[in-house]
Amino acid sequence: MKVSNSIVIFLLALMFSLSCTRKEAPGNKLNLSGLATEIRGSLIEGAGASVLLEEMGAREYIPVDTVECDASGSFSMEFFPEQVAFYVLRYGQSGYSTLLIEPGESLVFSGNISDPGIYTVSGSPGSELLRDLAREHKHTLEGLGEIGRLNREHLYSPDYAEKKQQFDQQFDSISSGFRDYSLSFIHDNPGSPAILIALYNLYGQGLPVFNPQTDLEVYQFVDSALMTSHSNLEAVSLLHAQVNEAKQIMNSDPAIRGIQKGEIAPDFVSSRPDGSELALSDLKGNYVLLGFWAGWSGLSREENATLKKAAELYGEKNFRILQVSLDDDRDTWTGSITEDGLEWEHVSELMRWDSPVAAIYQVEKIPYNVIIDPNGRVVAADLYGEKLLNTLDNLLNN
């Protein structure tokens, strides 16, 4: 997907807005959850050390509690979070660990003052995900740092040109390996805000793992996944607003408008009527008719007859239909599915035109149909009626 420099500026601005500054401890805040959360921890060589817990807002760190370790290095703290949120646990001179905590969790933390990069945590699924991501990130940065050290060491050697080529290859191998790990992390955990950390990770200052100029589809996937399950989080709202702004820029430039034949269809996650999640990639290996529609749209309801005909003709082949609704009322959505007899996969964020999936595919009208091949590439888009059926017949019967 071609991306303009303006989009890059918008999304990099979002990345930097998530680099928090500190804020004074707030006054008494209304506790919406009513659930106590406990952290019990121990620090090797931590006798008498201070431990600070801060909530990680979208633009600032908010102090939550400060405690002191006892003679054995143990500590505990209890607080009442309003909702799921990121936290930073700080200890020693420079030690810190990022946690993702839900109200009511009971965490057990273990760290080392002398080696703050090594820690364990249990009792919090989100924090455990971040621990795994942090370990892989630390291993990656250590590998890249070693390559940098070797490069400096051989900078003036006679065979530096040859060695530099080797160093560059090693750098690319390590960095691409972590990128692949991060992509898998994001796609394996679409319902967890932990994927935001994977999205914004850096190899070093000014070296993002995912660059908005080349990886806009990754930003869009994270947006679609988290708007489905965590739209109330400020960082998620910021990402959604920036991706929507990027969409407006793209739609204003004819050179980059619309989904293109032959490109990989952007993946996304959304919610079925029963609340379970479905990703487009779950249907990979089939021809997929991806249809955008709404129960309130008369033209969409008419086009549903074409989709029913396609299901009758090709339902026994490697062919699936996935409809994305741009409704904002659940009863209208599910009632239309029942009334029209649409017996295939359905998803919606119930956000009408603010749907992040519609933003990914730059949908400006409904109905809007996209055909995707078993390898995940776009075969055709903006087809309806007999033209849609003829295209499917050529693909599935020839």
Image: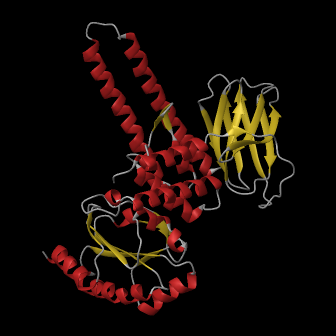
Q: Above or below — where is 310 with respect to 178? A: below
State how the image is colored: secondary structure
Q: Nearer the viewer, residue 251 or 49?
A: 251
| Residue 190 seen anywhere in this rendered image of the structure | no
| Residue at figure coordinates x 27%, y 83% from the top left | 310
Residue 378 sits in quarter:
bottom left
Please indicate whether residue 183 sits to the left or right of residue 37 in the image. Answer: left
Rendering coords of residue 35 (x, y %): 78, 58
| Residue at figure coordinates x 35%, y 86% from the top left | 303
Please indicate whether residue 286 sits to the left or right of residue 198 in the image. Answer: left
Q: Residue furthest left?
A: 398
Rendering coords of residue 395 (x, y %): 18, 73
Q: Above or below — where is 317 with respect to 210? A: below
Q: Nearer the viewer, residue 191 or 68?
A: 191
Q: Nearer the viewer, residue 152 or 190?
A: 152
Q: Above or below — where is 49 with respect to 386? A: above
Q: Residue furthest bottom?
A: 339
* Quarter of the rendering occupied by the N terminus: bottom left
| Residue at figure coordinates x 78%, y 35% from the top left | 75
| Residue at figure coordinates x 43%, y 20% from the top left | 146
Rendering coords of residue 129 (x, y %): 56, 47
Residue 282 sits in quarter:
bottom left
